[in-house]
Image (cartoon, grey):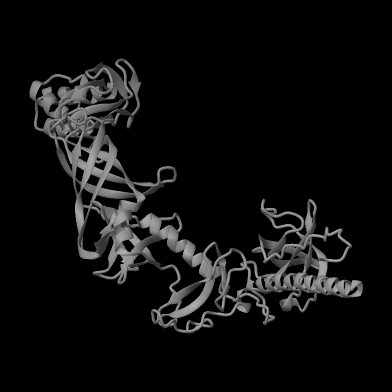
């Protein structure tokens, strides 16, 4: 009987051991299955089995499967995610092509987001140009008062700069000694009587002309019979004495400039036109000017010239505008606001300015397509006016562009396109030896699964399984830490899925590392505490 009981006990222990071993084997096999990747998990019957298959549920072709929480990784077969406790999600395409950068949103979500659209229109594009400038003298309306002979300035009627003068006004009187002798000789010869004196009189008169005596002084000498001691200098035009270089009593040389007179019947306004709008301003364009000094008064004129000079600081071009100033109200130095007559451009595509997203490098609009899809389109823009922007390239007449909510759509589109570009090459699987993807730097990325043995400042030691893409077997080795460091949820003893690249000769650096979904665990059998060595009853 004792022998029989002992045999029964040994059989129970063997059965318990087999159960424990089977549970351990089941847990390890499931863990290795998850480490190998989702391709080792059988796909649901009746659905797509690999990338390129058509899903009978919706008739769309499956491009790949991915984990929404780790979108940078793509898989060519369905299954359970190696990163999260969830099934992979298929990514569909139309006509076998990927919708890179496209965003699909249901009408209800569009309403919640406040997405609004507007059509691309065509028509005349009126571009008004406004600029500011400063009033200046019209340099074409300038006259100079000077003397042709040397003399003494005995009388000066203009005492200070900026005095006003009239045309024909006597502004100075000059004493010329060398003219006196010629005048006296002429008068002496004329007093003599006789036929021969007529020729001498003509010769004396000609001498006055040769010495530079003006005709009006000669006529005055002939009319009055007296010597004219002073030469009267008159203003050739009316205006403002802009420059005065003479003073009463001073001696002047022949050809010396005594004063400069600027007319005010017309003035210039030197306007600073933005470089981007200079193409809309031409010579002869009509202009209206206003100044704070004369509220309600509008001055009209035309563009006289576009000066070949660009201000490097303000990026503006100088436009010279000539304005009529019949009452002399505009004075040099006044500030003026100018409005240039708009130029109309026909047959120009245009969209609301708010639809254009300026990135600093390019201009983008979100185009609405059928089925609630939106796609970003690069455009070449022209001028802007009245809330409209000219489209030179990138759009067609009748297309719809997003005018509200476009920044959110553009961000989502950029994320989708980036994910697609980063995962263009499929990753490794348990049954293929191909690399997972090619990184943006050109390095080949590999994938493995293993257990963390130790962590130090620069590397982590992993006991990993086979790496098919490198034809490695199981081994324990060190890897350089990711550039951003290990995630906070990684610790020694954890089983992980990791991607790595060769960073140097004999060195490998981890790119991404995530905890592996926990495998099934079989509870350990407690040790037997039966101390009854007697016979069972």
Work out whether residue 61 or residue 393 is closer to the camera in this orientation and state it.
61
Viewer can see residue 362? no
Work out which residue is located at the far right of the displayed protein and give it: 3
271 lies above or below 282: above
Corner quadrant of residue 203: top left
Q: Nearer the viewer, residue 97 or 292?
A: 97
Name which residue lies at 63% across and 78% down.
40
In the image, taking residue 430 as reference, residue 193 lies left or right, namely: left
Report the side of 285 relative to 4 (left or right): left
Say which residue appears at 24% left-offset and 18% top-offset.
156
The answer to whether any part of residue 318 appears in the image is yes
Snapshot quadrant of residue 218 = top left
Of 263 and 503, nearer the camera is 503
Image quarter of the C terminus? bottom right
Residue 295 percent across, percent down from the top left: 16, 30
Q: Nearer the viewer, residue 138 or 467?
A: 467
Residue 104 % position (x, y): 37, 67
Measured as percent of width and height from the top left, residue 505 is found at 81, 68
Instruction: Name the residue at 39% across, 48% down.
Output: 310
- Give left or right: position of 164 versus 34: left
């Amino acid at each position: 009987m004792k022998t029989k009981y002992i045999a029964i006990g040994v059989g129970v222990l063997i059965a318990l051991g087999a159960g424990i071993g089977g549970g351990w084997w089941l847990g390890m096999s499931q863990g290795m299955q998850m480490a190998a990747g989702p391709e080792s998990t059988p796909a649901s019957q009746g659905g797509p089995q690999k990338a390129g298959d058509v899903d009978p549920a919706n008739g769309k072709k499956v491009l790949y499967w991915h984990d929404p929480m780790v979108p940078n990784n793509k898989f060519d077969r369905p299954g359970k995610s190696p990163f999260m406790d969830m099934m992979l999600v298929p990514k569909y395409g139309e006509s076998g092509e990927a919708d890179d950068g496209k965003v699909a949103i249901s009408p209800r979500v569009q309403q919640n987001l406040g997405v609004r659209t507007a059509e691309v229109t065509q028509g005349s594009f009126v571009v008004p140009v406004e600029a500011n400038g400063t009033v200046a003298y019209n340099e074409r309306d300038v006259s100079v008062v000077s003397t042709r002979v040397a003399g003494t300035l005995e009388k000066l009627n203009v005492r200070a700069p900026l005095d006003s003068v009239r045309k024909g006004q006597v502004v100075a009187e000059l004493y010329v000694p060398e003219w006196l002798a010629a005048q006296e000789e002429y008068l002496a010869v004329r007093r003599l009587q006789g036929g021969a004196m007529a020729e001498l009189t003509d010769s004396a008169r000609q001498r006055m002309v040769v010495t530079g005596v003006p005709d009006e002084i000669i006529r005055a000498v002939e009319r009055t019979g007296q010597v004219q001691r002073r030469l009267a200098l008159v203003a050739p035009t009316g205006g403002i004495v802009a420059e005065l270089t003479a003073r009463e009593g001073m001696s002047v040389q022949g050809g010396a400039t005594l004063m400069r007179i600027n007319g005010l019947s017309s003035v210039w306004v030197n306007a600073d036109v933005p470089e981007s709008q200079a193409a809309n301003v031409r010579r002869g364009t009509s202009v209206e000017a206003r100044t704070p000094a004369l509220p309600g008064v509008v001055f009209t004129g035309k563009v006289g010239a576009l000066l070949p000079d660009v201000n490097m600081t303000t990026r503006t071009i100088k436009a010279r505008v000539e304005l009529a100033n019949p009452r002399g109200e505009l004075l040099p130095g006044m500030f003026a606001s100018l409005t240039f007559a708009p130029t109309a451009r026909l047959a120009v595509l245009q969209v609301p300015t708010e639809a254009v997203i300026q990135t600093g490098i390019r201009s983008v609009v979100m185009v609405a397509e059928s089925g609630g899809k939106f796609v970003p389109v690069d455009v070449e823009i022209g001028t802007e006016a009245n809330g409209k922007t000219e489209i030179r390239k990138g759009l067609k007449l009748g297309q719809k562009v997003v005018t509200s909510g476009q920044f959110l759509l553009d961000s989502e589109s950029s994320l989708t396109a980036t994910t697609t570009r980063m995962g263009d090459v499929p990753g490794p699987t348990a049954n293929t030896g191909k690399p997972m993807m090619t990184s943006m730097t050109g390095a080949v990325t590999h994938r493995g699964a293993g257990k963390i043995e130790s962590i130090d400042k620069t590397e982590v030691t992993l006991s990993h399984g086979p790496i098919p893409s490198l034809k490695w077997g199981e081994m324990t080795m060190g890897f350089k830490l990711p550039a951003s460091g290990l995630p906070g949820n990684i610790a020694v003893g954890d089983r992980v899925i990791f991607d790595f690249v060769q960073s140097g000769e004999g060195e490998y650096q981890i790119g991404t590392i995530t905890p592996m979904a926990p495998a099934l665990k079989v509870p350990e059998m407690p040790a037997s505490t039966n101390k009854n060595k007697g016979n069972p009853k």
